[in-house]
Image: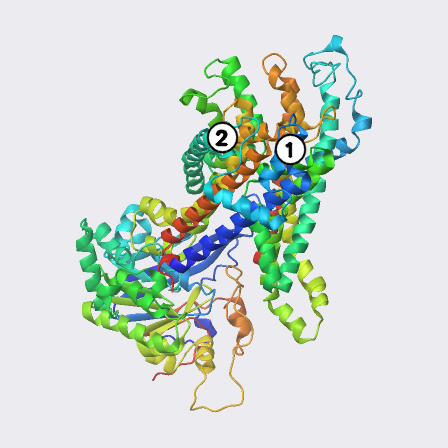
Amino acid sequence: MLMYMLKRIASALLTLLAMSALIFVMVRLVGDPAHLLMPPEATDADRALFRQQLGLSDPMPIQYARFLAGLVKGDFGNSFHFGVPALSIVLVRLGPSLTLTLAAMAAALLVGVPLGIASAVWKGRLVEHVMKCFSVAGQAAPPFFFALLMIRFFSVKLGWLPTSGYGGWRHLLLPVLALGWYSAAGLARLTQANLLKVLGSEYILVARLKGVPERHVVLGHALKNALLPIVTFAASQFGILIGGAVSIEAVFAWPGFGSMMVESINQLDFTVVQAAVIVSTLLFILINLAVDVLYAWLDPRIRYGH
Amino acid sequence: MSTSQAVLRVDNLVAEIATPRGLLRVVDGVSFSVDAGRTLGIVGESGSGKSMTCLSLLNLLPAHARIAAGAVWFGGEDLTKKSPRAMRQLRGRRIGMIVQDPMNSLNPLYRIGTQIGEVFKYHHRVFSSRERWRRALAVMERVRIPAAASRIGNYPHQFSGGMRQRIAAAINIACQPELLIADEPTTALDVTIRLQILQLLRDIQSERNTALMLITHDLPLVARFCDEVAVMYAGRIVEQGPVEQVFGAPAHPYTRGLVDAMPRISRRSSRLVTIPGQPPAAGEYDIGCRFAPRCVHATDLCRSRYPELTAFADGTRQVACWYPRQESV
Amino acid sequence: MATDLTSPLSATAETNVAITLTPPVARRSRPYVRHWRLMLAATVLVLIVLSAIFAPWLAPVDPDAMDLAAALQAPSHLHWFGTDPLGRDVLSRTLFGARMSLFIAFCAVFLAGVAGAAIGILSAYFGGWIDGMVMRAADIQYALPPVILAMVLIGIIGPNTSNVIIVITLTNWARFARVLRAEALSLSQRDFVLLARLAGASPWRIALRHLLPGVRDTFLVLLTLDIGLIIILESALSFLGLGVQPPTPSWGSMISDGRAYLENAWWISVMPGLMLMLTVLAANQLGDAFRELRYSAREVE
């Protein structure tokens, strides 16, 4: 188990390194950093100074090493749009995004998993058809479209909820519903499929042969096995949710990471873009690692493997 | 066979499966009984209906199958008429069943102490998990699992196939059932382990005078461990009786074929004896004797009318054939 | 009771029960149900694709033709999908938007699929450090959600149609590579490949004749399952202004344009959105049907 974790961590670091190299190369290859990393109104004298400060005349590997050294210290350069360190901007905007994403993940789990269980246990009945409609619809449209429909219906027509903005649970509700629907759909389908497969296993027959009550057979024996792969699925859903959050944040004017990226790309504020890419890669890698570890810990076949 | 001490008596059991082609009878009028302290072997090829018979006894047929007719007498009651709840209380407590595949018969996510102890929770109302653990350990030692105390907290994947069958046996005897059904308990195991497991079952039986039903296609095993044997073919029993008689002097051509097909070192020959042809697919039976297509002695009578199971040799044996070979050992 | 069983006349009087079939149970046969869904989804998808291809002929008016007098009109017999704030016919724009969105999506999914498959199969075939490098590259693509990676790439190389195709390809090839690499690896362990090797077949022959047909089914399933995702990805990019640039209509940018008019001119956003949903729905159903077919074929194996 320890070996497994070490290998995963080493692999993750390598990927992070590769990503940082990639973004470094891309930003510099596409254009002169003295143009890209400075505001458009900078003068030639400014640029010359910048070039000298950043050692842009040095060979690439040296520049990259300097770049890496800066990363480790947390220095990603300054956003020229705001003049403050790029990292601080990224971190500030990360908070609301995480709130949104985690809330959407929670909602998706709370809706999707029970729906999937019910569809497996009462297969062929109404609840299964409801689940199918729910999941087919959820996976057919981009979250931002759902968001617009919901805004029109709940905010404009009914006036129950605010149309946009950042605030308490009333501001959070629509974005979470719009964002989480897609994941809930996938979770419901996967849960149903897994549970049905597990219910056909030999050890479930044996549980019944032991005289275990049916409720416990399904919710104890079967469910535990069925939900194990859901853990890894949830991790992949996290990535999808972050991606969907970008457009949701744009729709609801949610001051999050995604809208920050859109803004900085439109403003050509590449220091922020660089910082954002590296921070989000790191975040992702950490989450995937955590999920891997969790899965390995939960499954005794890996934890106490031979 | 005296039925006065019969723990289980099955009476003309019929089980059907619903398929797109219609309702197929996989168990077509099967009757037998098992006495306390005795072992009944049920032999037959795959598809003869052996496993379905067992599942029918316990009302655990798959969703598309059902018992269409017949009765199953156990403890003075007809099990086919009992409610699911009553059946659940019976299973694991008064009737136990060991299934064929040891590699998949245990839940991979639960420790085996928990899985054994579970029966105490539901049948003996033992709510203390420590007490259940203690009793599980006792049962594990009864089935002679080595180093039980240190291994009780292990997970199924940490045991070999033979050990898992021992654990399955432990689970089944924990509540000391009156009847134990073993559905091909050793087919998936190494030859050396097989005898151990069956000896274990024998020991369990002698301890509590348990009635034992052994379902298998392995004839030498039946010859060695069973008292009575019933031979199934195409959903019905074609011969039944004490094992020495049935194997020593088989009356039915099919049984003869099975016995002859067993390779024996004492009998050298250049070819292995086989029974030509295939058994009929479940539910697709001809009129007349179902073995007739493969029987060298078949006559028009055999092909046109089914020979019901009839007693002979002083009533100790039964055979379903128009021309049974009448010998005794 | 001893009976003389050698004499047939002592047989019991009742004849046996004959064949025990009863009339078929009333159940819908599964193969037909599956077929029906597949056919419907394929038909819908084909219709949409055809109307996208023939948009120039099907569209009632020029999608860019402005008529400010007819601005913001609700759907009517004149304008089936209504008009937008510049008086442009929403139906025509939706059709041309379909053209653009579907063109991009199909190009991208095809490129990602073929490139990913080739990379995956070759990586499995060569093994060693090449395989390691390829898997590392796939990890990098997986290190970020496609939307974010796509946004950054577009930000660097600029938003236009061909760049969108390139970017979507770059952010989606890894799925194909990984899955097909796994397929190729497991296939190469199968007996028929071993036999081919024993018979002296060259590695190229093995790859082309034995491995490629084997992965074909998986490839098709992945392709159809992916189309929906990629259509949504493209619409997201356009919605954010990072995809197809105005005035060229694309579903995503049309939905974005209609945002301000949700209250009084909902059709501007909703019509293209519904078309998008319908297309993705049909594509998803098609992908599901393919996947089921493949699994049932596998069971037969």
Q: Residue furthest top?
A: C69
Residue type of the residue flagged with mark 2: Ile
Q: Dividing the image into 4 quarters, which one contains the N terminus of chain B?
A: bottom left
Give coordinates of residue A209: x percent, y percent: 32, 55
For mark 2, give the secondary structure: helix
For mark 1, give the secondary structure: helix
Q: CA distance from mark 2 to mark 1?
A: 23 Å
Q: Chain of mark 1?
A: A
Q: Nearer the viewer, mark 2 or mark 1?
A: 1
B120 w.r.t. C41: above or below: below
Toward the viewer: B128 or B120?
A: B128
Toward the viewer: C98 or B260?
A: C98
Give coordinates of residue C126: x percent, y percent: 64, 64
Q: Which mark is residue A47?
A: 1
Asked if residue C231 shows in the view, the reply is: no
Answer yes or no: do the residues labelled 2 and 1 have beta carbons within 8 Å? no
Give coordinates of residue C85: x percent, y percent: 69, 14
Residue type of the residue flagged with mark 1: Arg
Asked if residue C91 shows in the view, the reply is: yes
Left or right for C102, reference A24: right
Q: Which mark is residue A89?
A: 2
Task: Please report whichever mark, 2 or 1, sits nearer to the chain's N-terminal start.
Answer: 1
